[in-house]
Image: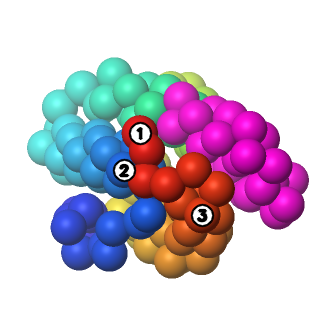
Amino acid sequence: MTIVFRDHPPLAQDFMNREHEEFATLLNRAEQSLLMGEPALPHLQNLYHHCEKHFAHEEEEMQLYHFPPYPLHKAEHERVLDMFREQLQNFESSGDVSPVLEFLLETIPDWFGQHLKSMDRVTAQFLYQQKGDAA
């Protein structure tokens, strides 16, 4: 399932919207490379590294402004990065496209939508109240 970023309501923080749009673009590229039988590992690695940077950026903002549910949000980021690492390792060792494709087509889009509506929406609103809409 290709993610269309514009289908999701924007958050109160521009940096989060920009980084989420980039995530959707990278996810769609990784999916397409797998579906077309093209070399997918570089796309998967780019997606994973984007997630690492994006999550670190969000976490830095949460810590800077003393976001009370920071530990819960950080734990969710770590859980998703763990899932990504496992998928990458399995794909690198086996070359089996099916599990990583299911992960990208079903697991991640479902998670992304829920995460945006819940944790990220609350985080963005808190940051907006603390600092305004800044990049």
Query: Can see residue 84?
Result: yes
Image quadrant containing the C terminus: top left
Calculate the distance from the C-alpha at mark 1 to the C-alpha at mark 2.
Answer: 6 Å
Q: Which span is picked out in magenta?
A: 53-81
Residue wearing tag 3:
129
Residue wearing tag 2:
14
User: Where is residue 62 shown, x and y percent of the image?
Assistant: 71, 47
**Residue 101 found in image quarter:** bottom left
Q: Main secondary structure of the magenta part?
A: helix
User: Where is residue 34 shown, x and y percent of the image?
Assistant: 26, 43
Q: Which of labels 1 and 3 is toward the front? A: 3
User: Where is residue 90 shown, x and y percent of the image?
Assistant: 58, 36
Residue wearing tag 1:
135
**Towards the viewer: 131 or 25:** 131
Q: Residue furthest top?
A: 42
**Residue 88 found in image quarter:** top right
